[in-house]
Amino acid sequence: MLSFNQRERKAGERFHYASAESEVLALVLRAAVGKPLADYLSEKIWQPMGAEADATWLVDRGGYELGYMGINATLRDWARLGMLLANDGVLDGRQIVPAEWVRAATTPESKHLEVGYATRYNGYGYQTWIISSRVRRFALLGVRGQAVFVDPGKKLVMVHTAVFRDSRDANARGAQFRYLDYVLSKLDNPT
């Protein structure tokens, strides 16, 4: 962890994603629950949602999960997680994650986190990227292009497992979003 004594801006004025903040969040959660995050995730979400395979999580040299990346799972299990989120924490009739929390996690809580303010194209929730200002749509975006796109209204989940050459490949990410928009437009206007 790095300490700091000067802020660039007041809290709540500007969004700036930093992987280090997600890592700190992971360390705080691990300390709060008193167990490795992989065990906690497995117990609270992975097993209850009926995952068909064990997932893996990249860990650092100290044995701590990388809180900003590194969960590896099968395509179908990523889709199960997406459907769990699309149904506000319910899967197969069972409430696994509180609905209020899922809605809060996938809705910008202030202006600087809305689509077009947080970033040019996206907003931000609790570790989720908000991808529409018109309807509730969000995504879990991986470092190199992996993604789980969720449209709760349509109960649509799209999982993208290809990997970009570069983690900051804006052209590839743009193509990914254009494809999502194309699929959604065909669902809205099937001609």
Image: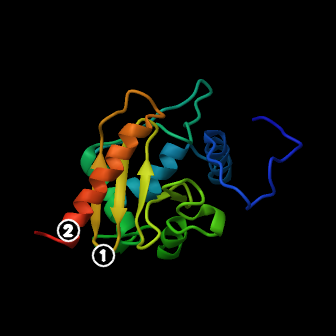
Image quadrant in which the N terminus is located: top right
Question: How many residues crowd mark 1 within 10 Å: few (<14), some (14–19), many (20+)?
Answer: few
Three-letter amino acid code at disc 2?
Leu
Q: Mark 1 sits on what residue?
A: 93
| Quarter where residue 161 is shown | top left
- For this orientation, the residue located farthest to the right is 5
Mark 2 or 1, nearer chain start: 1
53 or 6, nearer to the observer: 6
119 or 63, nearer to the observer: 119
Could you tell me which residue is drawn at 43 percent across and 34 percent down? 169
- For this orientation, the residue located farthest to the left is 191
Q: Is residue 172 above or below residue 95?
A: above
- For this orientation, the residue located farthest to the top is 61
Q: Mark 2 sits on what residue?
A: 187
Could you tell me which residue is drawn at 33 percent across and 75 percent down? 153
Left or right placement of residue 22 versus residue 148 in this view: right
- Residue 14 visible: yes
Please provide percent x and percent y for residue 47.
36, 55
Please provide percent x and percent y for residue 76.
25, 50
